[in-house]
């Protein structure tokens, strides 16, 4: 029996540490927090010095029981949760729940899960840092109070089910402000002049030299005038400037920079990046992944220096000690790095883990490598007919690659958009005359600010001091929650745009008009209409909470609590009461939000056309309430997909009222065309058929509708029958499938082209699905919508789409399939109530409150 019980928060971490510590330690996991604030509105007793009411989560009761059992078998309990504030809070909650004395229980911390780090931590334990715990308590309590009260206001004034939060709402505001910047932006055209010269290289072959005018022309006339002046001109090199240059490596990763680079290089969103990094940390491959420090330990620096010299040579090594520009707010004192630098890659884990590890290794080792040495050449070319103008050619030669041998930091698509590619120039000399191949003046347009990606939004939050490394990913995920609908990540096709190109060739200037796609986006963040309405409402009534500096100051106050400079209850006292007064005032006096905007008058009826936020989302409405006849309803139209309420005008709105439009009948069923939430469609009976991408619904006639309906009929036609029921074939977001008896059966890639699937192959897939479904259900209670199912790890209960664990039997073992088959519905319900106490409580219907008399208007 092990003498020591060590408790961590992750089962993967527990396995790795138990291998290191050996037989003297049993390592158990708390599976994260064992308790949290009560979900009801009595979670914080404001009147009693903000006393929080913590409860053990129903799903953690079994974990707590198992930990208490393990405690009974050990002589001493150690706590080894993560080193940040949340980890400190988990340790404190474990002390409270397991009745461990905070003042004597040993607490160890480490930044990497390696044998030396764990052994060192065991040799120098400390106690739970109550200041860190209080800083986390302050954050949790404040966020609960702000979120709960603001959300209640939104339910009453905007829409039921919405939420708000101290950090969440200012993050939405950032996206909303960027959305409005883009909407308000007017692209201004200009002309950029480039010239192509033909010269000979060192091998005597003719190569092209590209030069650019540093001046831009505001209009076509100016650009054309310049090209005409260059007709018959001599182009001569006036001077050649050669300068040495160098590039320095980026610092090792912090949480924010890791999220940004993983987004750019690996196309991972922030949540996925942190999930993968967590697995790498728990496997002992990298240091702790929630940090805003760029520092590396002296031990790590020595190991990296040795590895660089061994792998690349002494001239590639340059020890650097990076310092963070901001104070270390999360108590993690080292950047994210591999635990063992001589491990260049890993074959442990999935492909994501391997790719992210390799990225971290490259960034870390590059940070300790020599500068890249370059030689930059700038060639200034004179124009004989335009003495005050010049063209410029630039080239760059890499003299010594240095850190570039391993790694180069990426940039966002919007950065340096107009930067010229600097290649190697051919041999040139001062006074050399350059033969002109052609000169072009191409029309370009100024560009609006780039939309945020998840990673660039995190970068902005960090710049403003909003949130901390542990909060970035949850905050971004929360504002993108479909239930809230504030922000979406979308890929949108651009719009076609014409531009002019003027060309000087063979002493003649010609002009042509070309087309290009502009405004295309990939995985960029868009603010929705509801997001804008909520942000505007909160900004109007809670300007302090929505102020970026104020939000950052709150983070600083949490830091002060962590350092023991101020009590957490005093900090809450200072903030809460003025905030609560505003909540009450807004609830009482603010008008309900409709975001209504009049956009014009219908020329046929004279009625008002407006856009507003309805219960089901943004709509265009024809007819204001005071213009309608008794019992008459206004006409509504949906906004085109991807369009904001603020962009709608009369030209866009009026054609939309012609939809849905009935086209006629096909095979005895009505055919109509319209626009829904998922885009334009043709409706045939009760079936909806999406139009092709970019197809205008107003152009759809009966012939096109019949064409789409025929294709739909063909796709839905049974490909065979099985046990007297039709089998159909289709394609969905997860790939091709068969549908039979209400079940969807995926067609694996190994079967080849789904269109060529044989009847024998279909029967094989259907039989496999039948067998799987037969083994899946142990018992079914359709009236209660409860199923007892066989899972990978044993029987479990499915209730309202949730998986409920079945407690172990009397022997302390997992329940068998046979035992689960004998469970009564009463027993099953009891198991459900262990995790969902109110699952079967009958809700009493509230009596309708008497209608309030309308208050008389106030005298002005």
Image (cartoon, grey):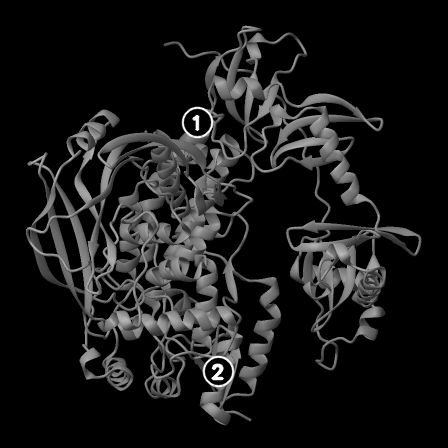
Q: What element carries label 1?
A: helix
Residue 674 in which image quadrant: top right
Q: In this view, does 494 lie to the left or right of 578?
A: right
How many marks overall? 2
Residue that badge 1 annotates? 646
Residue 585 in which image quadrant: top left
Residue at screen point 15% across, 60% down: 427
Closest to the observer: 782 or 704?
704
Q: Is residue 278 left or right of residue 203?
A: right
Using the image, determine if residue 730 lies above or below residue 230.
below
Residue at screen point 53% across, 76% down: 11
> Which disc, if any, is residue 16?
2
Q: Residues within 10 Å of mark 2 (few under 14, many from 20)?
A: some
Residue 420: % across, % down: 24, 50
Closest to the observer: 710 or 61?
710
Q: Quadrant of the C terminus?
A: top left
Residue at screen point 41% across, 65% down: 86
Residue 528: % across, % down: 47, 37
- Residue 95 appears in the rendering: no
Residue 138: % across, % down: 37, 56
Q: In which quarter of the image is the N terminus?
A: bottom right
Q: Is residue 511 left or right of residue 815?
A: left
Which mark is first along the chain, 1 or 2? Answer: 2
Residue 584: % across, % down: 42, 33
């Amino acid at each position: 029996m092990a003498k020591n019980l060590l408790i961590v928060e992750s089962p993967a971490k527990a396995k790795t540490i138990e291998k290191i510590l050996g037989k003297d330690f049993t390592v158990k996991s708390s599976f994260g927090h064992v308790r949290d604030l009560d979900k009801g509105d009595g979670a914080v007793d404001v009147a009693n010095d903000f006393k929080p009411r913590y409860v053990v989560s129903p799903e953690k009761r079994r974990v707590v029981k198992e930990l208490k059992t393990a405690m009974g078998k050990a002589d001493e309990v150690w706590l080894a949760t993560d080193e940040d504030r949340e980890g400190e809070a988990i340790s404190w909650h474990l002390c409270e729940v397991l009745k461990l004395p905070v003042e004597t229980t040993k607490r160890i911390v480490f930044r990497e899960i390696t044998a030396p780090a764990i052994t060192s931590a065991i040799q120098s334990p400390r106690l739970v840092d109550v200041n860190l715990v209080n800083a986390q308590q302050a954050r949790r309590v404040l966020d609960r109070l702000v979120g709960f009260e603001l959300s209640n206001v939104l339910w009453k004034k905007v829409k039921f089910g919405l939420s708000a939060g101290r950090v969440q709402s200012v993050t939405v505001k950032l996206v909303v402000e960027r959305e409005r910047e883009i909407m308000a932006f007017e692209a201004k055209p200009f002309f950029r002049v480039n010239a192509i010269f033909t010269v000979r290289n060192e091998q005597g072959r003719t190569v092209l030299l590209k030069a650019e005018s540093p001046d831009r022309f505001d209009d076509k006339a100016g650009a054309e005038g310049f090209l005409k002046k260059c007709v018959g001109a001599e182009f001569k090199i006036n001077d050649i400037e050669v300068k040495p240059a160098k590039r320095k490596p980026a610092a090792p990763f912090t949480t924010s920079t890791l999220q940004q680079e993983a987004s750019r290089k690996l196309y991972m969103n922030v949540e996925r990046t942190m999930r993968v990094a967590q697995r790498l940390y728990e496997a002992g491959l990298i240091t702790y992944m929630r940090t805003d420090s760029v520092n590396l330990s002296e031990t790590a620096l020595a190991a990296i220096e040795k590895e660089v010299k061994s792998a690349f040579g002494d001239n590639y090594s340059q020890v650097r000690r990076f310092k963070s520009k901001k104070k270390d707010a999360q108590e993690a004192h080292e950047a994210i790095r591999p635990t063992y630098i001589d491990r260049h890659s890993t074959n442990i884990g999935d492909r994501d883990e391997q790719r992210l590890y390799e990225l971290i290794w490259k960034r870390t080792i590059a940070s300790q490598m020599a500068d890249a040495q370059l030689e930059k050449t700038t060639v200034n070319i004179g124009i004989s007919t335009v003495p005050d103008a010049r063209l410029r050619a630039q080239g760059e030669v890499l003299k010594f690659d240095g850190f570039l041998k391993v790694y180069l930091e990426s940039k966002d698509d919007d950065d340096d958009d107009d930067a010229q590619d600097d290649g190697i120039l051919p041999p040139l000399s001062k006074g050399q005359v350059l033969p002109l191949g052609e000169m072009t003046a191409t029309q370009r347009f100024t560009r609006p600010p780039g939309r945020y990606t998840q990673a660039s939004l995190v970068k902005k939050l960090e710049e403003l001091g909003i949130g901390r490394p542990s909060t970035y990913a949850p905050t971004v995920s929360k504002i993108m929650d479909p239930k809230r609908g504030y922000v979406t990540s979308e890929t949108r096709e651009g719009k076609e745009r014409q531009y002019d190109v003027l060309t000087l060739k063979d002493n003649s200037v010609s002009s042509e008009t070309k087309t290009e796609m502009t405004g295309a986006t990939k995985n960029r963040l868009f603010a929705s209409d509801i997001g804008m309405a909520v942000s505007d409402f909160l900004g109007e009534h809670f300007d302090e909470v929505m102020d970026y500096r104020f939000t950052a100051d709150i983070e600083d106050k949490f830091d002060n609590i962590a350092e023991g400079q101020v009590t957490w209850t005093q900090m809450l006292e200072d903030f809460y009461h003025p905030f609560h007064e505003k909540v009450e005032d807004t609830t009482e006096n603010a008008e309900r939000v409709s975001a209504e905007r009049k956009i014009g008058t219908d020329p046929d009826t004279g009625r008002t056309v407006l856009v507003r936020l309805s219960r089901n989302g943004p709509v265009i409405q024809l007819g204001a309430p005071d213009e309608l006849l008794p019992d008459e309803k206004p006409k509504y139209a949906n906004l085109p997909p991807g369009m904001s309420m603020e962009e709608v005008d009369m030209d866009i709105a009026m054609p939309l009222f012609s939809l849905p439009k009935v086209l006629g009948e096909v095979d005895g069923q009505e055919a109509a065309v319209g626009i829904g939430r998922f885009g334009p469609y043709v409706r045939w009976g009760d079936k909806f058929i999406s139009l092709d991408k970019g197809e205008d619904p107003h152009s759809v006639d009966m012939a096109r509708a019949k064409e789409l309906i025929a294709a739909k009929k063909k796709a839905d036609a049974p490909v065979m029958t099985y046990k007297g029921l039709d089998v159909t074939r289709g394609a969905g977001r997860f790939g091709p499938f068969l549908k039979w008896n209400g079940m969807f059966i995926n067609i694996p890639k190994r079967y080849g082209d789904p269109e060529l699937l044989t009847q024998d192959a279909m029967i094989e897939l259907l039989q496999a699905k039948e067998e799987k479904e037969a083994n899946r259900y142990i018992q079914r209670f359709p009236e209660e919508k409860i199923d007892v199912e066989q899972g990978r790890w044993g029987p479990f209960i499915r209730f309202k789409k949730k998986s409920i664990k079945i407690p172990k039997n009397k022997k302390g073992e997992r329940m068998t399939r046979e035992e689960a088959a004998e469970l009564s519905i009463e027993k099953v319900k009891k198991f459900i109530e262990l995790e969902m106490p109110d699952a079967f409580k009958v809700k009493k219907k509230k009596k309708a409150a008497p209608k309030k008399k309308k208050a008389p208007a106030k005298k002005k």
